[in-house]
Image (cartoon, coloured by chain):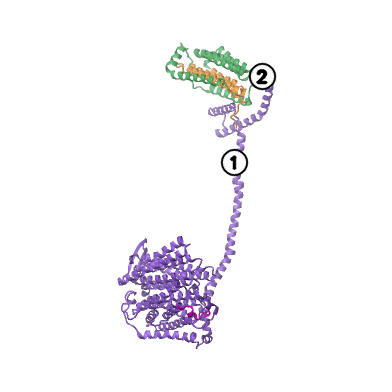
Amino acid sequence: MFYYLALAAILFSIGMFGVLTRRNTIGILMSLELMFNAANINFVAFNRYIITESMAGQLFAIFIIVVAAAEATVGLAIVLLVYRNWKGIDSDNYSVMKW
Amino acid sequence: MTESADIGIVFWVLSFVILVSAFMVVSLKNIFHCALFLIMCLFSVAGIFVLLDAEFLAAAQVLIYVGAVAILMIFAIMLTSNLASRKIRQVNENVSVGVFVSVLFALASIILIAQTHIWHYKTDFTPVENSIVILGKYLMIQYVLPFEVVSILLLASLIGAIVLARKERS
Amino acid sequence: MTEHSYLICLLPAFSFVMIVFFLRWKEKVAAGFSIAMILASWVMSVIVLIETLARHGHAYEAFYNFLTFPGLNFQIGILVDPLTAVMLVVVTTVGSCVQIYSVGYMHGDPRFSRFFSYLSLFLFSMLGLVLANNFFMIFIFWELVGLTSYLLIGFWFEKKSAADACKKAFLTTRTGDLGFLVGLFLIAVYCGTFNYGEVFDKIAMGAMSTGVLTAAAIFIFAGAVGKSAQFPLHVWLPDAMEGPTPVSALIHAATMVAAGVYLVARSMSMFVASADGSMVVAIIGLVTSFMAATIALTQFDIKRVLAYSTISQLGYMIMALGLYGYDTAHGQHSVGYYAGTFHLMTHAFFKGLLFLGAGSVIHGVHTNDIREMGGLYNKMKTTAITFMIASFSIAGIFPFAGLWSKDEIVAATLHHPVFLILTLAIAFMTAFYMWRLCFLTFTGEPRDQHRYDHAHESPRVMTWPLVFLAFLAVTAGWVGLPWLHHGFSSFVFHEAPPEHHGPSYALMIISLTVGLSGIGLAYLMYYKKSLSPDVLVNKFRPIYNLLYNKYYFDELYNVVIIRPLLSFANFMWKFDANVIDGLVNLIAWLTVLWADVKQWFDKWIIDGAVNGAGWIVRQTGEGLKYVQNGKAQFYTLFISIIIVFIGLIKYELIYLAWGWPIMTIIFVIGVLLLTFVSRSTRQGTNREIAQEDKV
């Protein structure tokens, strides 16, 4: 189980790194998917090794996948909108919420 | 490492593929290549799910992520395509801090996981037969309300995405 | 009507208010209103007098307790007894005459209405004083009377002499009032009430020891001394003649100066209980009377002669009252009380008449100096005749009013030879100086032809009051004829009416002789000129000088009181200017210095701290604003950092050398530094990006 968890942790870290550093908004969304998957791996691993009788871990994973899909849908729609307005999807470029 | 016996060569291969492709996702300059590596990564994660006796989840992963989300990504990349193949810098100025924090987080997590012994590992695990049947029963009986709510959420996001992405008529 | 007698004093008050607020610009209406009010008061006073007579002199008292303290009670009330009734009639009669007379005398004065408002205010105060049923009220009205006296003496305040005179009068009477106030305190402390009857009852029951009683009596008498211009506070009255002549007639001859006498008569029960106090009163009365009479012999100002005459006559009354108290205290029978009050009444009429006549003369010739008059009989017959009637009256000639009252005063001194002789001497002098005045003014050759030519009789509005008062100057004394069994003496009395002893013909003859001889001497000296006054003056030059300069009282006061006061004041002023001011200035300087220090401190330290805090916040903000750079990823980075840090701390994965708070701070500072680093590198990054974008 340790290896699964460690894998998830590293995957999460990579996703986090992507979220923190990608300039491309789509890149950020993809990194977010990586993080979601890391969490999913955790859930399934726990389900597999700790609470075998119930399927709560897997159910959670299913819900996460759904939410991730929804998030990806809305996020990409927003990206399209942003692209139309700014002619670019670099996250640096739309820093209008600054001081 | 009592469960090391369970960890076959498959796991290591999958893990390697996952990590490398994930790293490629966050570091490649060509966003289209990133998307392809993401697909590979998610596919490997589905393999991990299979290893963990979650076949339905693996199927769902492939179906939704690889079949839907990744394709959605590629569509989005294509729609903003004038940038897609440009070899521009793909990371922002936070990269040094980001590396530091991420590495720190990974190390801390792994140390924590390694230090933790409170979990009661089930080493004598026997795979559940017909896990899909059980999962379906759970979803339709015990977790029917979250299931419906999540459906509505998905619907709402769908409509929202259409509304957002719709081109306004002049 | 008696129960509504408070209206007698309220009507003039109403008139005062109306004139001041509504009728000031309508002179004729103001005067008419004022006269109507005082005439109404006069009618009511007469009715009250008749009612009092019908009650056989029983007192009527009505009051309202408006402030009650434990052990002290303040009342507002009226007391109508025979003395009050008589005083009411006297005051309203003279007041009416003077107001009517003033219409003529003040004609054309720029402050005509104001004069009548003052007169109304005075009459209100005086009538209130007479009607009061307790010492507290009488004191209030006493002071009001003093105030109106001040206002009226200084009515022509443009004249420096008038302004000085009103100040002098006010301050001098105030000296006496201080004594009155002390007397009131004594009464309040020992008797616990101010009501006349209750006070006298308490005194009769021995609420005060003899010494305290004497002190209280003398203190109260001090008020009377001030108000009635008795020695040694007599100096203000002659100067008060600077006021308009009707004022002199009303206030400084007939009514206000009589208030002192009234006060002594009113509080006679106190004097009766204190033989020593009574003797002081009698001696002061005698001294005043004698002194004023001798001064009057030598004066040439017509009003000043009358003023000293007034002082002299008031001294008479005071003396009579004092002797009554003394004799009664020793169980002897005396007519002093009746004599004093009787003379008070008759004197009010004939002295008022004398002043109004003098005013008429002054109005005609525009001078006060009798040396510039002479032969005015031909020009102003009415004035001359009424003036002479009054002079006969004051000289005590049969059958004029003065004779009867003066006889009673002489009778009151029978037990005291010194008093008797001096009283007769005063009577002689009175007759002499009054007729000297008459002869010099009205007979002989005109000494100033110019003034004589322009002299004229006064208008009727001025002569009618003269005639009316002349009538009273003759007849007012008849109510006290010794042949009457129920005359004045059986009406106004203290405790018990004096036994009716019938006419004393010997006394009458002596008195008459004295008066006639005085007139005769004046006749010889100033009409026949068979005796030259200059010879006498030369023969007794020092005495003459002494008298002519009024015993040097003003100079004496100047040297003894005013100079030291002034030099003391001067010294105090210098002290003030140098020491106190220096001290004050030093303190001020120190304060300013301290304020400067504080200001500096404020400006640099406090403000510095505040501004510094602001500056620090601003600079911190300047630095920290780059944290808020609007980039979602940067925020995410921060959140991640914090989460990682919290996780590290939570699971003790890092060594917390100085505890977690300090480590947190160090961590945050480190993050901030990282932020700055990234900020500084951003420029380059942006340039890089820009270059890449061009590619």
| Subunit ID for the residue under disc 2 | B
Q: Are the numbered discs 2 and 1 placed on the same chain, yes or no?
A: no
Dot 2: element: loop
Q: In the figure, C104 relative to C618: above or below? A: below
Q: In the figure, C18 relative to C643: above or below? A: below
| Subunit ID for the residue under disc 1 | C
Horizontal side of C449 relative to C219 (left or right) equals: right
Residue B87's label in the rendered image is: 2
Residue B53 in sight from this viewpoint: no
Residue C273 position by quadrant: bottom left
**Circles 2 and 1: CB distance less than 8 Å?**
no
Decide whether residue B44 is among the magenta residues.
Answer: no
For the point 54% across and 80% down, which residue is it? C449
Quadrant including the C terminus of chain C: top right
Horizontal side of C600 relative to C242 (left or right) equals: right
Would you name the residue on which mark 1 appears? C613
Amino acid type shown at disc 1: Ala
Horizontal side of B76 relative to C33 (left or right) equals: right
Dot 1: element: helix
Give the distance between the C-alpha atoms of the residues marked 2 and 1, in whole angstroms: 49 Å
Amino acid type shown at disc 2: Lys
Residue numbers of the magenta segment = C371-381
Q: Residue furthest top?
A: B129
Label 1: few (<14), some (14–19) or many (≥20) C-alpha neighbours in 10 Å: few
- What chain is colored purple? C
Q: Which percent across, then down, holds residue B26?
A: 61, 20
Q: In the figure, C548 relative to C201: above or below? A: below
